[in-house]
Image (cartoon, rainbow, N blue to C red):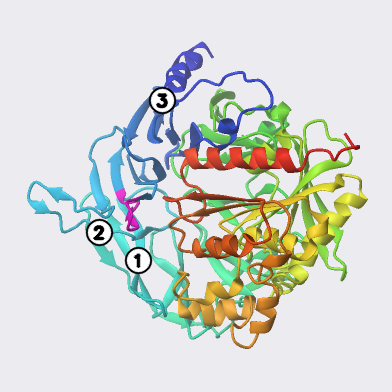
Amino acid sequence: MRKWSKVFGVLCALLQAASTVAAPAPVEAFFRDPVFSAAELSPDGRRVAMLVSSKGTRLQLAVLDLETLKPQAVAGDAERDVARFHWVNDQRLVYSYRIKLTGPNLTDEGPGLFAVSVKGDENRVLMATGHAFITAGGVDSTVLKPYHLLMDVPGFGMGDDVHVNKAGERSTKKVDYIDVMRLNTRTGRSKDIELPLHAHSWVFGHDGEPLAVMSTQEGQSRWHIWQADGRWAHGALFDPVVGGGYSPQYQSPDGTLYGAASAQGFAAVYVFDRATGRPVGKPVVAVPGFDIRPHFIANDKKLLGIRFTVDAELTQWLDEDMKALQAGLDKALPTTANRLSVPRHGDSPWVLVQAFSDAQPTITYIYNRSTRKLARLGQSLPDIQANDGGQTDFHRVPARDGLPLPVYLTLPPGGGKKLPMVVLVHGGPWLRGADWRFDPEVQFLASRGYAVLQPAFRGSTGYGQKHFQAGFGQWGLSMQDDVMDALRWAVDQGHADPQRVCIAGASYGGYAALMGLARDGAQFRCAVAWVAVSDPLLLFDSTWTEATEEVRRYGMARMIGDPKADAAQLNAVSPLRQAARIQKPLLLAYGGWDTRVAIVHGEQLRDALKPHNPDVEWVVYREEGHGWAQPDNRIDFWTHVEKFLARHLAPAEGNK
């Protein structure tokens, strides 16, 4: 292990050495960019690529050679952070930068797409960032225009191609079509892939060829399955808002097609019939009470396992050797969930291990199956100590109408009863909220002594079709009831001091925080709302939203409410129109260039609150969009939150 220590000392110098800090850790420790993140094993398992930074430097792409134990920085920029990368083959990667917003007229610099070798040479620009790229011979005609998107297509890392797509003729009304292309990372040349009209969701095989696509037109969708005789078999139309009951998702190396389908109201994994595109037999993976969203793990010989999240992340290994390996590493690392990544081809002995828990930011290890040695590569947030973290537990509690509500409760270090509480409502709202893993927002609040309650209100995904559809048309109504019922449970269980509760959230979560004050103000001391919807009707105004008319008509009108037929209901659940009832302290924050929830949501609410609420704190980050991409802004915002909560959730006089 002496050799490992010497080499990884070099790597740690490239990153930042972990330091011992006094508890609680400062705001920066939670909200800076990770110093080590996104580690990914090369297809042949002989290298690890990762994003690294040291204090004051931008995120760079680095590659560690596991044979020589030598790290190498291969890509980076003094002005921008590398945000994403992907292995193309054993010797080549592609990467993109974080979007950069600059200037007074919403001038943005896109992520671009660039290729580089594992030695840091053989560079090629594949997609422009917004500026003209000039080569020695003039403008390189092979460079793609901005805002093509890199696609996640399975494969075993043997070729030079990646897949990209780009929306064609996008307007405020609809996206007419989406081009899908195979892009060569050495020549920069791209080739269109012929697909059925109006396709927008794709399943590819390991050879990079399409297996199944979903198309949508006029609010109706269907699956198309590629047949062995060279034609597309077209499935039946279904409602994309509630889903078609099944969806093909992955083809294993032996040709078996897998997908998701309903099993007693919950999504499960099935084998699919290639000819019909429908599930057959019993589920391969099913967990009552949870929807399975599978990630398939394979090498070039067979499907090894299926990874998914229920209350926490699990991997169901289909391979006996992988089962044994998982059991051995879980025994060696008993306090964390341990995600294993293995080579996609070849005989490399290396296994990448990413270990995390509710209180532990990800620690990355490399394990050698031949020597049985486990070595630590790095930790994403080295100033966070797991022993100082709060404990997160999953519960199901009854809503007032009997619907089971999934709830995550995090207690601060040391636990306790009748604690000051932050009800943290997730955004979306139609997505999976919390799960059992390290969340910097949750652990930051816990480190300051607050219990954190995260309710998966109806409309949240991941808990079955009934739970999801129960949220349709229920903004500010039963969705808000669920938040209050979860809080009632926390109070009844003795976890929360009912006199010291704040409600907080972003986007839809910010809307719920505002409605918490407008509708149930007596239950809260204060609220924190960032990038928050202040009026659902503003989401239907094309002046202030990026959503197309097609999305507003066929999706939002059903899931939120029709802006004409349901206008009275939407007005009744609008925090902006109920502003006179918002009388508790409020922290509002917005991004100046948010195109999803435009800053007008906040400006109109701020102005409506001025006559009767003197305790509104207003924060704007002019060069941010829908959330805080820049670490300095994250640190600044959560510093505001820390001071705001300390001021308003202090013990009442006489109860200290």
Looking at marks 3 and 1 on the same chain, the residue that comes earlier in the sequence is marked by 3
- Residue type at tag 3: Glu
Image position, residue 433 (x, y; %): 66, 55
Query: What label does residue 166 carry, if any?
Result: 1
- The tally of labels here is 3
Instruction: Point out the residue furthest to the bottom here.
Output: 565
The local crowd at label 2, few if under 14, some if 14 to 19, many if 20 or more residues have their Cα within 10 Å, is some
Cα separation, mark 2 vs mark 3, equals 36 Å
For image coordinates 38% across by 47% down, the residue present is 157
Q: Is residue 545 left or right of residue 357?
A: left
Q: Where does the magenta region start and end? A: 102-113
Q: Is residue 583 magenta?
A: no
| Contact check, label 2 and label 1, Cβ < 8 Å | yes
Residue at 31%, 37% (x, y): give it.
Answer: 77
Instruction: Residue 112: say if magenta.
Output: yes
Q: Secondary structure at mark 2?
A: loop
As drawn, which residue projects farthest toward the left?
137
Q: CA distance from mark 2 to mark 1?
A: 10 Å
Q: Amino acid at mark 2?
A: Leu
